[in-house]
Every structure is written in C-alpha cells, then in structure tokens.
Image: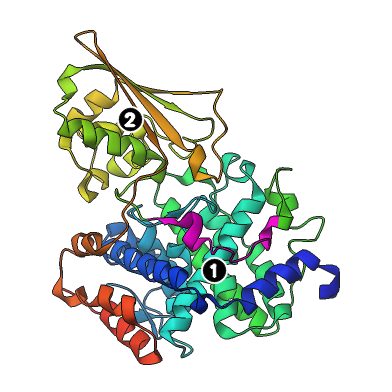
Amino acid sequence: MTMAKAPLTTAFASAIVNSDPTRDAAAMEAARTAIIDFLACTIAGAADRTTGVLAKAVGADLPGDAILVGSDRKTDALVAAVINAYAGHVLDYDDVHASVRGHPTTVIIPALLALAAEREFSAEAFVASHVVGLEAMARLGLSLGSKHYENGFHATATLGPIGVAAAICHLTGASVEETAVALGIAATQASGLRLQFGYDTKPYHAGMAARSGLLAARLAAAGFGGAPDFLDNPVGFHSAYAFDAGKPELTAKDWGAPWQIVSPGLTLKAYPCCTASHPVASLGIDLHREGLTAEQIETITFTYPPGADAALVVTKPTNGIEARFSPEYVFSAALIDGALRLDHFDERPVKDRIMALAARAGRRHDETAPRMSTDPTTRFVVLDIALKDGTTINRRFDGLPGVTDPTDKFRDATAANAAFADIPDVVRSMKTEADLSRLLSLLNQNPI
C-alpha cells in the first residue's frame, strides 16, 4: 500500500515532520512552562510508594543510560519512559489539555528524556518536539469527538502513544513515510479505560503511552513494517475509537495555526486532583475565606452540563487516591481546610470530618445546557447550598482554574530542595546540547 492512498495520514505525518515551532515564541515559552510544571510533578511523584512498586515490577535495575527523574539511577530507555511518565501522573497534579481531554506532557516528555540517553540533540529541538507531540494529540482529540472519552476510553492512554511517536519522529527527522508507519504502530497500541480512575493503574496509563510511542518510533526507524494509513483505513483509528462521532479531516486542518499549546493552551493544575473537580475546589476555598463552615450547611448540590463530570467516578471515596475523582470530597476538603494539599489525596483513609460534609452533597445535570465538549467554554458548574437557617447560597464557576507560573508549585512539590532549585531557570533558558545535558544531570540525582 502506498502513501498516495492515504491522504489524511500523509497530511498528518507531513505536518509532524515539517513543523518548526521554534519560529513561534509563544509556543516555545508555553512548552518550557509545561516542562517545569511536569518536572515538579515528576520529582514529587518519584517518591510515591507506588512508583517504587512499578519500578521494581518493570525492571528498573536493567542496565541503560536513561535517567530516572528524582533519583541517581539509570536504566533502559523503555523502562525509564514508563517510570517517569507514571511518576509525572501519579499525584494527578500534571497539566491537562481541553482538546486532548487528557494529560499530554506527562506522556511526551518522559519519552523524549529517554531518547536523550540514546541520541544527542539540542534543548531547543527537545522543546519544539514537545509542541509537535502535543499538537498531534490535540488534533486527534478534536477529530475523535466526545464519545471516545464518554464511552470509557482514557484519552491520555489512547492518544498518548501517537503523540509520543509524533514528537520523536519530529525530533529525529524521520521521513513522512517512516512517520506514517510509526503513527500506525503507536495507534495499534492505543489502550486505556477510565474504569481505572482511582486506582494505581490510572497513572500507569501515562507510562504505557510513553513506552508504546517510543517503541513505535524505534520500530519504524528500524524498518519494521506496519500499516501506513491509520487515519484513512476503513478499519482504522476513527472506525475503532470515534463511535461514529469522528471527523478525521480535523487531524491536520489548521495545524499549528495557532499551536494548540497556545490556544486553547494547557491548564496547569492548581490542585492535585482530577481536573473536572477543580471548579468546585475553587468555590470551596472562596467560601472558606468568606467564613462559611461545614456546620452551617444542610445540603450541597453541584449542577454540571451533560458529560462534564464523566471523569468524576467516585462519590464515596475510602482513601485519598479515590478522593481525587470525587467532587463531593474535593469541595468539602476545600471548604473545611481552605486549601487542597498533596496529603488530602494520599493513600490514607479519608477523614471522617470531611466525609461528614461530603455525604450531604449530590449532583445533577442541566440537560438544557450544551454537552460538555473539547471547547472549554462549555465547561461550568453551578453550586447550590441550602443552609440550616433556611437561607441559600448560589455560585457558578465557568471554565477551569489553573496557575500560569509553576515556580511556586515547583518549589512546593520539590520541598524547596536545593538539589533541584536551578531546574526552572535551566528549562526557561536552555537551547544547546550542553544545556540539555545539564538538565539531565540536575534531574538524575538523589536529593536525600
């Protein structure tokens, strides 16, 4: 089968390999900011108990030159991609993109870091390839429509391998033909179900995707055969994953105009829990500042547009990991404590004082509102609180809260450890191979 018979796949692959994000200062700056945010999450996540469990299970003691972020260990590149991606997502504190409806940076950057152990390239090229990989994930997300996610797929896991393969093919200067095959090999590894939300397997989806995309690019570069038409084939990607809601033509349409990392842009998380719960978190913190207490509240009702709480699969969490996906818990913790910290969402059992309020919360959907889509303007939550004195409180939050500068987040997530203090400045200014080498050295140290 020739590339001429696959116009959509060819256009997609061509856009990937011929892109030059370095000419767009806003895109490059956004990518650098995203990398700082990701590294904050990964350094903190590297210390998580389950990261250690995963590292042992997947063979972190295998020989290799790829770094394990937040430690002084090195291992095989594919293994490092799995572990670093998992560490970046395990705290659910990493960035999210509306078009992807998932988490792109925690998938793409670990694979690029692993590649850095095998090939030398400039830091500027490294950053640019992140822009391209994210663009690929976002364009695919737009093209799939809403049913892919709502029917149970986790887009981080299904679009991630393709985004990674795109980033690597761009960075290595692969041909259009090789890239098309790499994308197809990545697509055939697309998997991951939302039923794993609240379990250790959810962040493993990021590790799966990072490894699969890296392996796909390696196989294609080695001449391994694969279908070159994953977007065009009648039994291809959209046939399998879009549930008749797809628009494959959107994959390359308006590519980089603007770059998706610029518009709609990434949301850098303000809270270490599922993104869909962040609006109620902000409302809870605001009400805490206004002096509202749990004791005053009779009932709480959250109203979402249809589909907006699809990721919020837990109503009665038993531990902090499950609680990341419970708006009832998130709002209650935010209102009672006035903040949301990493220790609200660890493995320990949830606190009775928080769950006592969460038990009084419920949800409904506004069926007259537009269905929540990849357009962030369709996202909202309405909060109605009935107080014991008979009065009510009504608040609305549109869009998503987030942080624009992750410097403080980096400092907090790394416990202000001096070993990592220079990383944000290095990422903001790095351009050369030597700069990237310095970043790798800073990341590959044991701070204890």
Residue 318 visible in image: no
Relative to 9, is 327 above or below?
above
Whether 114 is drawn above or below 246: the answer is below
**Quarter the N terminus occupies:** bottom right
As helix, strand or loop, the secondary structure at mark 2 comes to helix
For disc 2, the marked residue is 328
User: How far across and how far down the image is residue 331, in percent?
Assistant: 28, 33
**Residue at image point 14% right, 74% down:** 418
Tell whether 68 sits left or right of 167.
left
Left or right placement of residue 256 versus residue 433 in this view: right
Task: Report which quarter residue 225 is drawn in.
Answer: bottom right
Q: Quadrant of the C terminus?
A: bottom left
Give the image location of residue 321, x and y in percent. 32, 45
Residue for badge 1 = 133
- Disc 1: CA contacts within 10 A as few (<14), some (14-19) or many (>=20): many
Q: Can residue 13 be seen by looking at this rendering?
A: yes
The answer to which of marks 1 and 2 sits earlier in the sequence is 1
Is residue 258 inside the magenta stretch? yes
The boundaries of the magenta stretch are: 250-267
Examine the image and state in which quarter residue 336 appears.
Answer: top left
Q: Is residue 305 left or right of residue 44?
A: right
